[in-house]
Image (spheres, rainbow, N blue to C red):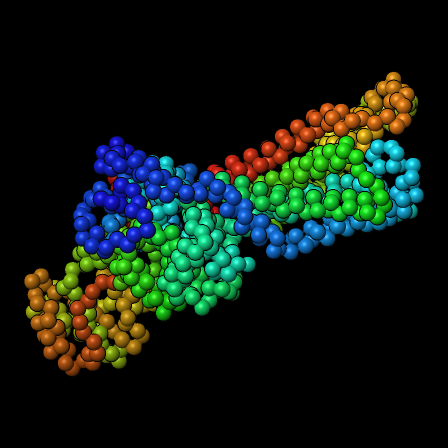
Amino acid sequence: MTIVTGRPSRRRRSASAAAVATASDPTAPIRTRALTKRYGERIAVDALDLEVRAGEIFGLLGQNGAGKTTTILMLLGLTEPSGGSARVVGLDPTRHPLEVKRRVGYLPDSVGFYGNMTGRENLRYTARLNGLAGDEAEAAISVAVEHVGLTDRADTRTDTYSRGMLQRLGIADALLKDPDVLILDEPTASIDPIGVEDVLRLLRQLVHERGITILLSSHLLNQVQSVCDRVGIFAFGQLIGVGTVPELAERFGFSLNHIEVVLDAGVEGDPEIGTLLMALDGVAEASRAVPLVEAADSEASAAPTPPAGSETGPAGPAERKWIVTTEPGREVHAMIGSIVGALAAHRLIRIGRHEPTLDEIYRRAVEQHGKRRLADAAEGAA
Amino acid sequence: MTADTVTSPPASAPPVADAKVEPAFPHTSGWAIVARKEVADHLHSARIVVLFFILGAATLIPLYFASDTIRSVAGQLTDTRGAFLALFLASSQDYPIPNVITFVAIVAPLLGIGFAFDSINGERSEGTLPRLLSQPIYRDDVVNGKFVAGLAVITVVLVAVVGIIAGFGIVRLGIVPGVDEVIRLLLWLAVTILWVGLWLAFGLLLSVRIRRAANAALVGFGVWALVAIFGQLIVGVVASVIAPWATAATLEQAVALKALSDGILRVLPLTIYQEASAVLMRPDLTTVSTPATIAQLGQLEAQVQGQFLSFDQSLLLIWPHIVALVALMAVCFAAAYIWFMRQEVRA
């Protein structure tokens, strides 16, 4: 494929390239095999196998310190791996760093610009470093600045920019070289909610119009959930789950046969509602979703663990949320009907299928992985 | 590794292919692009103003006070060699003002440190370093470009200042330099640039090693103070401790003691530079070392006064000094370079 055999200079690839991509695709723009980075005793990235397909947005999700940035630096040849190999646009970033950096745009975590220069001047410097000069550079700068909506601020000094504007200028900066691959480290951190929406829309547009492949890392899971084609859950330097959000939900034991039942907080008698719900035909389990504050209290008193990560749900203090698990094979809409009937006397304010957020999936994935690691360690010790 | 090679046979081919597609890609001159930006930064910064004021004051004030002295003896001086260079050596008889070359020797380290102490850690704290390094340039282009830029700016200012002094001498005092003197002046400029370069490299090393620019500046100025001010004092103490005689009772002992402390003093780069610049600017100096014995002292005194060396003989005399300065600068720069290359991109 053209992606590997050299750069067809300054072209617009069609987004249909994404359709060709299949599992274990040898032409995937980013591939790593057993990629490892050790800092002394500490393992930052542990035998990572990652594949980002052409024309997709891949989200690398993980907590701070999970190894996301280290992985990205290795992909760019800015840090040498301790083991394993990586291929970016078909090249080994350790051996051909210049070639890789020429074709990969990078937005670093909390990107900075020279405050004594204007946005345009900053971009001009980047353009020059990429071998662009004169009219060609000016045109590219104007396009990039337009893309991120900074045209009217491009000629003011960057030390007057807000964090969000710097972030957007950083994206323009990464776009200047007309990259095949865009690697964004925490692109939405420290941007206000409306700005986040703009940035995410821009990323979608880039993939659609230019067929760019995007790898982004984030710890703000719900923000990026909407924009990523696939996500990889990153913890302890390892990728503990890869796939689309529904795939991951299933993989980590979130069945889609959960129903969320929200009652007004004025209702008394939790046990009564529990029995009511359990008594219904087709209900396998019904449990109260404890809000965060209460959960912390009950944890202290060693109460049974609350169900499926629902404590982050939107149930405010004025609401009381229950999660009902239906028996397999039950129609969700039919079940909703019977629950509504059963709770007619109680102040029901909301009901519907409970779909796990990426936050919940992430939490459970990390928990499961942590348990497995502990078990492995115990086994190893025994 | 092997599996990868199998699945991606063209992995080694693309660089060659791409080089053909974009032959004019200037990645070989990445340092030049960095240097160009840095020079522009320096020229717009407050530093350059300070630099001009310090060097301007350093040169014009002594020149102003000394010009009367020079003018009064100019008649006698013009027929001997070295009158032109006296512009740089002149000091006032009435005021305790150091002459130009002494001032430059003391101030140049400050300039070097001032232009480099925040070059790398500044990029780090501004968050521009990862972005800069992710551009298609080699990592050493950043260090090289910054070093070249600092040196270029300081060189331009030094040349300008020397030009002003020379012009003043020629126009106001009517002292015209001979070829020998011009060459000596250029050599002195070259050695001075080397001297500044040493401190620039040292400043660069500090900026690579010390994460906070303010701390780097403090350490840099501390080292400068040690070399420029306290160095002489410390050397005096050390010499009296290791000398066979605590106080010199005879002339013989006095001479030996002086030779010893001079030898120790030469550990300081400042001494090396000062000796080199003195020999270059004063053709009548025929030796850099203090006479170690009475016999040598006698020999020195027996020399005919007014006997001048030609510039190549002077150069021969200070060749070791130049080598030492180059070596020191190379060590500082290499240390900065290696540290920078091995450092992680982020903290």
- Is residue B151 shown left or right of residue B5? right
Which residue is rendered at x = 74% and y = 30% of the image? B266
Where is residue A141? Give x, y as percent: 42, 58
Which residue is rendered at x = 49% and y = 57% of the image? A121
Give whichever of A378, B112 is nearer the camera: B112
Where is residue B38? Give x, y as percent: 56, 49
Where is residue B105? Give x, y as percent: 74, 40
Give whichever of A230, A364 is nearer the camera: A230
The answer to whether residue A380 shows anywhere in this view is no
The answer to whether residue B57 shows anywhere in this view is yes
Q: In which quarter of the image is residue B288?
A: top right
- Is residue A22 shown left or right of residue B200? left
Q: Look at the picture and state if A75 lies above or below A175.
A: above
Q: In which quarter of the image is residue B104?
A: top right
Which residue is rendered at x = 66% and y = 36% of the image? B194
Q: Look at the picture and state if A200 lies above or below B342.
A: below
- Is residue B149 shown left or right of residue B258? left
Q: Quick one: quadrant of the C terminus of chain A? A: top left
Which residue is rendered at x = 63% and y = 30% of the image? B327
Where is residue A308? Give x, y as percent: 23, 61
